[in-house]
Amino acid sequence: MTVLPLALLLNIAPSEMQPVATPFFFYMLSGLMILGGIVVITRKNPVHSALALIVTLLGQAGLYLMLYAPFVAGVQIILYVGGIMVLFLFVIMLVNLERTAQERPFNKQWVVGITAAAALGVMFVVIYAKGRALFPEPVISLPEVENTQRIGTMLYGNYMFAFEIASLLLLVAIIGAVVMAKKRI
Amino acid sequence: MLSYITSYLDKNVQMTPGQAGNLFWALVYILLVFGGVSLVVVCMNWLERKILAHMQIRLGPMRVGPHGLLQPIADALKLILKEDIIPAGADKVVFWIAPLIILLAVFSVYCVVPFGPTHAITDMNIGILFMLGVSSLGVLGIVMAGWASNSHYPLIGALRSSAQMVSYEVAMGLAVVSAVLMTSLNSTGTGTLSMIGIVQAQNAQRVWFIFKFFPLGLIAFVVFAIAMIAETNRAPFDLPEAESELTAGFHTEYSGLRWSLFMLGEYAAMVAVSSIAVALWLGGWMRPFPNFLHGAAWDLAFSLFPALTFFGIAGLTFYSTARMPKHAYFRLQTLGLGVFGAAFALIGLLLLLPPVFTRVQDIYWFVAKIAVFMYLFIWYRATFPRYRFDQLMKVGWKVLLPIGLGVLILTAIVGVRV
């Protein structure tokens, strides 16, 4: 059977369920995320930073898809886009855009910055060197089709208590917001 | 190459091109859906003006082409030729991207719209979640458009619209969850989020979810139907377009082609949310009354509906052709209308061929159900007065949200008992 050149490039074999985890998409999404991250910290305008953050988070959703976790990817889009919306509105309403445009975007905290970067670098090197020992299983091949159902059974079966506690915490946050925002209830 | 293309047409491949991993057919489907939706938007432009006009005892567009049929083309030309104004001090990049984000969000949704058991671009395990998530990206485009215009009216309008869309998304989500809950009433007890799976669940349970647990399914459907009008910013919730009272909204500063992109996005979103409603509650691609009117004779009768629809449209067109004024000035228009009717009749004849009408059945019923919703959208606009903003928020949070929650809980209780 002859194969399309493009399909060869993307490692897609015809007419069979094939994992989407191809190197091409991985590097594309990773590059997009890194680019977005750099734009977030270099832009002086906070609105542009918020938009770049969306690009980064969407790239992350793509990575979740490649890890056979479509449900997490979908939730990532819904929750983080909603979260960024709120951030966006905060930026528009609370931040003085004219003042931030004149300020330097970087603080001169070289010591802390270099320490953090060095720690992260050491961690990367260690993981790269000892990767096989730390993560013996290269890929756990969960069928994509059952992903959502499995998360459902896990959340509402095995971890029911923790799930309900988390929902209680969110309820407290909502009530707290109402109490603080409204003077007369 | 050729075998790669034909491998999808094999009888054993009973799935969407996205699932089969066939790039060629996925591209064909994407182009078909994109072209089809754009065509629907053009038709809706004309239909909306005509139907609104006739409801208000006016004629509507009559000058460009017979019965104003070429009006959408004239409109599009006007919008393309119009000067494209970017306000001074506007954030150019964001101003550019905002309409594109809305379009991208709306058209991505069509990836999972199930036109038939195998007629979708792809079927995802998280179909309905994907639809809700990606369509909520549109809010972002609205806020960006309002902010980037560097003007107070669009900014206030954008905040108003985003508050509206975020509020109604909650009610919409609750209604959707109660429908998803109904899919889990099978022997295994696991539901599904995939759009095709939801329609197949209705097929397996032999009932459209709008009639399931009467009246629970109906109430959830009504909640969704109201929320989806608010989501697409249509009358009576069209505060973003309220030129008469509110100086329009987030797209006040947009003009020309870029403004038309917003309109394209709005109409495409109308089709998208209607398709969610059709797939979740109205049985998707299934024909009406499969329980009462079953058997080979009824199947044949219902499979003739696509052809009959086109013959009906052709007949109406011929009737209008016969009623055209006999003056020499209208000769070209009369001829054009006749050709238009003949084209419809030809499509109808084509749909009478057995290999054709067995294949377009699913697509026809899905599109026909969407068409009903599109007519309702226009009808609402002609009928209901616009809501005030505080009334809009009250309906969203104090009426639809509690009803949606109540229906969800009751559906769960009834579902456990069954």
Image (spheres, helix red, strand yellow):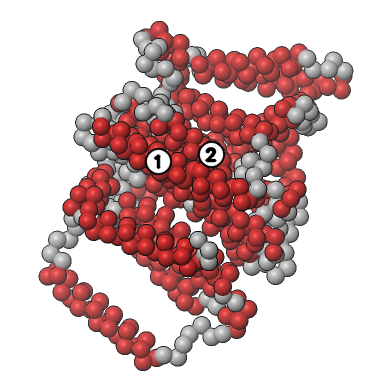
Point out residue A89 in the picture as x, y percentages from the top left corner: 54, 65
Tell me the mark number nearer the camera, choosing from 2 and 1. 1
Q: Residue at x 67, y 22 (%)?
A: B340
Report the amino acid beneath label 2: Ile
Residue for badge 2: B226
Observer-nearest residue: B182 or B75? B182
Q: Residue at x 63, y 41 (%)?
A: B236
Residue for badge 1: B406
Residue B61 visible in the current orientation = yes
Q: Residue at x 32, y 31 (%)?
A: B201
Residue B265 visible in the current orientation = no
The disc, 2 or 1, on the residue closer to the chain's N-terminal end is: 2
Q: Residue at x 59, y 15 (%)?
A: B311
Q: Is residue B154 left or right of residue A172?
A: right
Looking at the rendered structure, the number of numbered marks drawn on it comes to 2
Q: For label 2, count other residues whose C-alpha is less than 10 Å away and answer few (under 14), some (14-19) or many (20+).
A: some
Check if mark 2 and mark 1 are on a common chain.
yes
Q: Is residue B258 left or right of residue B405?
A: right
Q: For label 1, count other residues whose C-alpha is less than 10 Å away and answer few (under 14), some (14-19) or many (20+).
A: some
Q: Quadrant of residue B126?
A: top left
The image quadrant where one finds the N terminus of chain B is top left
Q: In the displayed orientation, state which residue is furthest to the front.
A: A184
Q: Quadrant of residue B328?
A: top right
Q: Is residue B56 above or below residue B321?
A: below
Observer-nearest residue: B289 or B19? B289
Point out residue A177 in the picture as x, y percentages from the top left corner: 45, 65
Separation of residues labelled 2 and 1 (CA atoms): 16 Å
Which structural element holds mark 2? helix
The image quadrant where one finds the C terminus of chain B is top left
Q: Is residue B198 above or below residue B357?
A: below
